[in-house]
Amino acid sequence: MSDPNTWTIAEARDRLRGGDVTAVELTEACLTAIDGAGALGAFVHRTPDIARDRAKAADDRIKTGDAPDMCGIPVGIKDLFCTEGVPSQAASRILEGFLPEYESTVSGRLKSAGAVMLGKLNMDEFAMGSSNQTSTYGNAVNPWRRGNDETDLTPGGSSGGSATAVAADLCLAATGTDTGGSIRQPAAFAGIVGVKPTYGRCSRWGIVAFASSLDQAGPMAKTVRDAAIMLEAMCGHDPKDSTSADLAVPNFEAALTDDIKGKVIGIPKEYRMDGMPDEIEKLWANGTAMLKDTGAEIRDISLPHTKYALPAYYVIAPAEASSNLARYDGVRFGHRASLAQGDGITEMYEKTRAEGFGPEVQRRVMIGTYVLSAGFYDAYYNRARKVRTLIKKDFEDVFGQGIDAILTPATPSAAFGLGEMADADPVQMYLNDVFTVTVNLAGLPGISVPAGLDKQGLPLGLQLIGRPWEEADLLNTAHVLENAAGFISKPTKWW
């Protein structure tokens, strides 16, 4: 029998119900794997006592014969989710020592479903980054390597720790958040599945805010079926979040019929970027052919305002971040700087924020404050909001013409080496989000599915974008693509 920590959620669920293994045994297998994976930097706050207690409770619940699908499943929780009595730092020094007295709605739903929390996972500071290099804890490291090259690679960001933990079989699944691609890009870099649901499908309550009109929680898992199982447990209306949709949550797993005959898949011409690697182009063409072979109709489409998406995103997201992060001032939360004699409140604010925020967060706060300032508000922020409306309308027009889903690459490249882009213009790093930010600006559901390897043996992902609130249909199409691609590669263990 394979090691339990390598199982999928679906396999573990069936074995738990069948009595082949207990939740305690499954949890211990994951805790052992975590203990041996310090080099990956994935888990930053371990909670073995909580995990063992929840595993015992899950075993009792399973014996009653009335346990939800996630009962007994060991998961990791991104450090952006507040967890009662457990450090929740958003990977920032400014929240050092913060122990919430409450549980985020999403992690609370997983807890209620019987899922076992193994600990908190690494991430870019305040979810600002595409490489997990801005964390106060240090880098998370991708378990994949380029052939025999020992260079540490990025797992992507901001949910880099989540991607690493799932890909390295430290947990069966993990939570992530996605503001501009922070679930889908790391999922693609690590060869796993990541789902960004429709904005409002998962509650944002208790998740440390980055950009409130863009942030959305979602699952990161080994397969599309696992993502469907976990997503159902995470979703649901929450009166504590005014943006939470009061809609019934479908049985996403039951929607995996593998029948997409007659579905229309759109291929947007604007996503054919200049300088896109041949491997990405080929992967996209292969994915298109796979969906066509399974009965879908392929149709070329146009999303004309796509070229403005990155500039609009990098005005709107920092603007909202500068507003959201104003609360971290040395008075209300977390770290407070030591003051010299004669320092007043202004010096306290300045020193606290200079010490507490890393360079990337400082950069985005300054950009955001600038674009919201008098004289620039209309020129930047208001204009970006208008562009966002046009991008949203592009998608509405396409879906109104009978398109069921849109197929694009997930990332413009495979995982790159940690530090390889450190000296580059920050805009070069921001370009990692080129295929993903439109989905957040339009509030749509998207999913990254591993679909192949590049010539260096690194995973590459394809993205499917769905109609709003139709995650069930999107997951079914993704499941067909997953089966057709037949991606079963795993990283060779070196850690």
Image: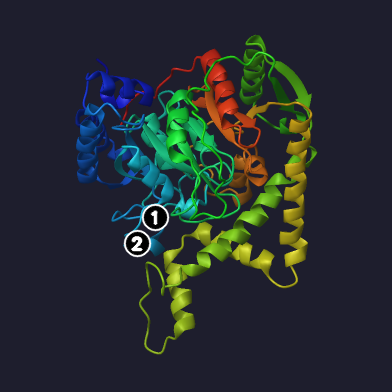
User: Looking at the picture, how far across and down is residue 460, in whole percent?
Assistant: 54, 26
Q: Does residue 58 appear left or right of residue 317 in this picture?
A: left
What residue is drawn where x is 20% and y is 42%? 53
Q: Which mark is residue 31?
A: none
**Residue 284, above or below 120:** above
- Report how many numbered discs are placed on residues in the image: 2
Kind of residue at badge 2: Glu
What residue is drawn where x is 52% and y is 59%? 361
Which of these two is toward me, 482 or 315? 482
Tell me the crowding category of disc 2: few under 14, some 14 to 19, or many 20 or more residues within 10 angstroms, Cα based: some
**Residue 471, above or below 350:** above
Q: Picture quarter containing residue 474?
A: top right
Please identify the residue farthest to the bottom as the structure is shown: 342
Residue carrying label 1: 136
Separation of disc 1 and disc 2 at Cα? Answer: 9 Å
What residue is drawn where x is 41% and y is 72%? 332
Which of these two is toward me, 249 or 387? 249
Q: Does residue 77 appear left or right of residue 85 in this picture?
A: right
Residue carrying label 2: 96
Kind of residue at badge 1: Thr
Residue 494 visible within the image: yes
Tags 1 and 2 in contact by the CB under 8 Å rule?
yes
Closest to the camera, between mark 1 and mark 2, is: 2
Q: Earlier in the sequence, mark 1 or mark 2?
A: 2
Name the quarter where the N terminus is drawn.
top left
Name the quarter where the C terminus is drawn.
top left
**Residue 142, above or below 325:** above
User: Looking at the picture, how far across and down is residue 261, in whole percent?
Assistant: 66, 13
Tell me the crowding category of disc 1: few under 14, some 14 to 19, or many 20 or more residues within 10 angstroms, Cα based: many
